[in-house]
Amino acid sequence: MSTLLQIEGVGKSFGGLKAVQNVSLSVTEGRLSALIGPNGAGKTTLFALMSGFLTPDTGRVVFAGLDITGQPPHLNARMGLTRTFQIVQPFAAQTVRENIAVGAHLHLPRRAQALEFAESVASQVGLTPQLDKLASDLTVAGRKRLELARALATRPRLLLLDEVLAGLNPQEIAEMIPVVQGIAQSGVTVLMIEHVMQAVMSLAQEVWVLAQGQLIAQGTPAEVTNNKAVVEAYLGHGTAERLQKNAAQAKTAQEVQA
Ligand SMILES: Nc1ncnc2c1ncn2[C@@H]1O[C@H](COP(=O)(O)OP(=O)(O)OP(=O)(O)O)[C@@H](O)[C@H]1O
């Protein structure tokens, strides 16, 4: 399988804060991967660097074999690289259909065609019954689906999903997971930022872990969740030893009792 997106030595600082430091990774075409890490690790900044919303201070971004470092987001979207946002901001006074059509206009200049294409995208994310509703009347889960639909309407090759499950209740999360899976199965390469580990474990084929702006682990979901550096990044220094010591003490206590 080929590499669709490659970032090499990418870094970005805000004043004295190194939000992303020397990060390199390759996203394989056709895969569903995840980027995880504690709050403030630099995940959203990395998405912004990949998609052109920010220009890196160091390093380069290569998409489909072309250097796109510093290229603005609308040109990246035209090439097939689209992102969603953690905070969803649809055009509130427009219908769901019209909102989705905005994304479709990237490749369909005629309004009637864009509106028709919006319908097929809506069905992909389960928004067909809401097509004529105003975006402002959608629930949080509906807005999340709309954000997905707007991005899908641009016909991405690579879709960067920034916490599409944030703010959803357990049932809504369970309903959204197959939607994301369906998008990947339709041939779109997906990289998602996600805090909901249940989703990462069930969806991701490959996971990267960021902490304090640096990549600290990479592997399958099972590999990264068993990685000592990852456990410590989430739970604090010394946690891995403490957990090991507690498990050993519990085992000894069981043996003494037996
Ligand atoms: N535009 C900005 N100006 C200044 N500091 C910023 C800016 N954007 C992000 N930061 C800082 O950079 C660091 C990384 O932020 P970022 O939002 O990328 O982290 P994150 O991993 O996406 O966090 P979360 O999981 O909480 O969304 C944080 O310390 C944040 O406060």
Image: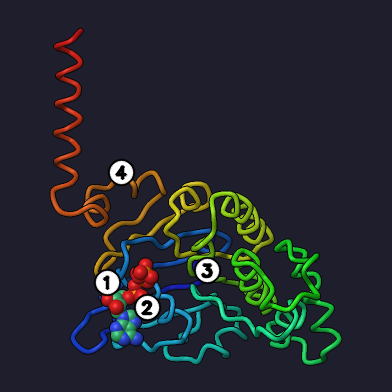
Lateral position of residue 100 relative to residue 14, left or right? right
Disc 2 marks a residue whose amino acid type is Thr
Q: Where is residue 107 in the image (x, y as percent from the top left)?
A: 72, 86
Q: Mark 1 points at which residue?
A: 213
Q: What element carries label 2?
A: helix
CB under 8 Å between discs 3 and 1: no
Q: What element carries label 4?
A: loop
CB under 8 Å between discs 2 and 1: yes
Circle 4 crowding by C-alpha within 10 Å: few under 14, some 14–19, many from 20: few
Image quadrant of residue 24? Answer: bottom left
Marks 3 and 1, the one that precedes in the sequence = 3
Marks 3 and 4, the one that precedes in the sequence = 3
Q: Name the residue under label 4.
A: 226
Marker count (numbered): 4
Cα distance between the residues tagged 4 and 2 = 26 Å
Disc 1 marks a residue whose amino acid type is Gly
